[in-house]
Image: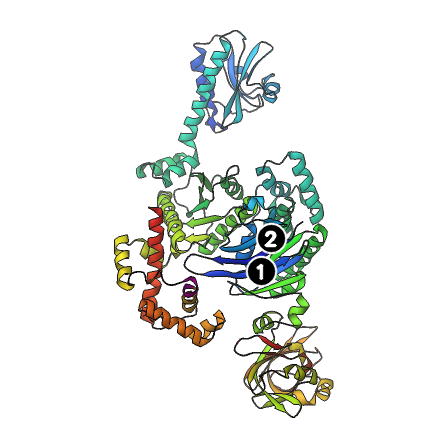
Amino acid sequence: MLWNKNLEEEYIYRGINVKLFQNLVYQIKEVIEEEFGVTDETGLILGCSNESRVGGIHPSVQKFAESKDAGAVYNGVTLQKIFLKNKLEFVAFINTSDSSSQKFLSLISINITNIKYYFEEKFDKGNFIKNIILDNILPGDISLKAKELHLPLNAFRTVFLIKTGKLKEIYSHEITQSLFPNKAKDFVIVLDDENTALIKELKTGDDFKDIDRTAKSIIDTLNTELMVKAQIGIGTIVDNIRDLGRSFKEAQTALQIGSIFENDKAIINYNNLGIGRLIYQLPPTLCKLFLKEVFTVGSFESLDTETLFTIQKFFENNLNVSETSRQLYVHRNTLVYRLDKIQKITGLDLRNFDDAIIFKVSMLVKKYLDKAEKLV
Amino acid sequence: MASVKLKNVYKRFDGGVTAVSDFNLDIADKEFIILVGPSGCGKTTTLRMVAGLEEISEGEVYIGDKLVNDVQPKDRDIAMVFQNYALYPHMTVFDNMAFGLKLRKTPKDEIKKRVREAAKVLEIEHLLDRKPKALSGGQRQRVALGRAIVRDPKVFLMDEPLSNLDAKLRVQMRLEITKLHQKLQTTFIYVTHDQTEAMTMGTRIVVMKDGFVQQVDSPSALYDRPNNMFVAGFIGSPQMNLINVMIEKRGANIHLVFGGHDIKLVESKAKQLEGTDYIGKEVVMGIRPESMHDEDTFLEAMPESIVEAKVEVVEMLGSETLLHMFIDEISCTARVNPRTKTRSGDVVKIAIDTNRVHLFDKETERTIIN
């Protein structure tokens, strides 16, 4: 015996309770008279109609596992490989080589695969967390299930939503999973080709600076290893597992708002969305009305890139003409001329604080509308 | 190994922000070039455009002879090292270095060969079986470099890789990276905001500000012959003293007048001002701290360029002493002999070595004479 665990115990092997292998064998035993069973790819017998062999090593499996054959007969024993997610996980065997043996093994394989998926669905912690963030579980069931899976209900956690470009062969989740290998505390969930969520348990005393540092290290590692551009949206810190869904939605919102207002930023924190958060909530019709009120038709569009750059610098320098002209390498009078021109086109004197605010908000509203139109 | 060329490169973000403007640079094969400048000057954006992690708004980027504007980052044959590097905690050093290659499905023997070779270059062969937890900060940094080396890239791009290290380790790793460049004989493009790092590591330095290249030159040329006031102030620590002065011509001589002080410019410098329209105008005088002296020998040798200064703080650094002082109301720093007897609160005479004076246009900030 390679393990002395009593089969009555809840012993999990390869993500399956070993008791289930033997239960399956008991049920099939009533139909098949010959000795049969299931091993892992090394030959360790996990379930067998001859119960005394459980825990021992099957003499033919290792050699068979190394071969390229999906099924074969060794010394009168028919063997069949069971692949899960393209990986050899188990081998089914039956001590006969007659014509029906292959059929029996195929049926056993189907059952083992189903058990595995059922078990994964039911007892996989990652799957449970995925169901929470995607609202696929009733709120009332969360606490119960968390207890069943030995997951602490109350722990500080946050959600990082990692968005990368589409990758053909290599996936960002493998990198993220390798960076956070503690599967009891951190969960990496693949959402689609481009999005991966990391649900991370925080250490006591971790604050947003630590969270930001974690996000930076994910971005830098993805850049280094995959040479791919990545963006991360971060939700708020939650202290109850039930609230992870909220943190995930916040991370999604952060990415959405960030892609409109802060496209050049790699890390966007939900707690730090600024005025973008307000504008994002406004209905487009209201935004259009606002722009119509501020600008006469076509006036905003008539501002060229150089003028927009001038305005940007002027705002960055707190409406200081001297400092802006110095940074733009232009004479002060040139800048004054440009500001006058902007006033003529838009009716807004950017040297005036109120007008400057209206222009700044208008630029953000325009950005939002442009993006919204693109999405439509 | 490859040359890198950036031709009229621009980066404009949504909303009109231009992060990089008309960037032109030819980086020779095997060169170690540094992009340096204050935060937000566009150096990282430029590096990311070379890597392909940032789209180019306008212009062309070549790696070797190949135009790479539309080439995917992973196909550009480059490797990057960043500031916030993280090692995979559950993997050994070997696996950490091999992980990227494994993801790319590189044959096992090839991975083994490349990791061993990189470990030899970095002198971490004895650490290959250790986990990151058992490594010192410097060793971890080497593993991060190793992850880039195993790719055997044509160009290494490094974005402030030493910023997260403590001061002592940073100095040590600076030397390690310079040695690594010599060993690998590959093109290095290195981004930093630390001018000391730039001066000590690069064969050429690109100084940037507000998205514009200010000057591309060797470290010594940047120090001795800055193109403008920004480069003069940015390069050098403590930074160059900048004082507004009036240029006055008296007979054949040129005098620089400020506050109650009047210093005579040496003949060679005065000649450079001939034919310019700066006579009678206010300009900015730049003088490096080491060109201001309190020793008697200098005071005797330069009687026509002596000013009076009130010393606020004396910083003794062992090999040198810094005098932080006020000349009239202008704050200045002098780097003097450590045996100086000057103490805080003293009013002392300071000789300005006018052979080493720089003059800048007050309006354009461009250099008039170096």
Whether residue B197 is visible: no
- Label whose residue precedes the other's in the sequence (2 or 1): 1
Report whether B220 appears left or right of B55: right
**Amino acid type of disc 2?**
Leu
**Residue B261 x %, y %:** 60, 89
Quadrant housing the N terminus of chain A:
top right
Q: CA distance from mark 2 to mark 1?
A: 17 Å
As drawn, A282 above or below B305: above
Q: Nearer the viewer, residue B360 or A145?
A: B360
Q: Decide whether the magenta segment is chiefly helix, strand or loop.
A: helix
Q: Nearer the viewer, residue B344 or A349?
A: A349
**Residue B140 x %, y %:** 62, 50
Q: Residue at x 58, y 60 (%)?
A: B24
**Residue B71 x %, y %:** 55, 46
Q: Which residue is mark 2?
A: B157
Magenta region includes residue A307: yes
As drawn, A106 above or below A275: above
Q: Nearer the viewer, residue B107 or A25?
A: B107
Q: Which residues are magenta?
A: A303-308
Q: Tell me, for residue B24, which label it has, or none.
A: 1
Report whether B232 appears left or right of A148: right
Q: Which residue, as the protein is rendered here, is positioned at the far bottom? A: B251
Q: Residue at x 40, y 38 (%)?
A: A130
Q: Dot 1: few (<14), some (14–19), or many (≥20) neighbours within 10 Å? A: some
What secondary structure is found at the residue carrying circle 1? Answer: strand
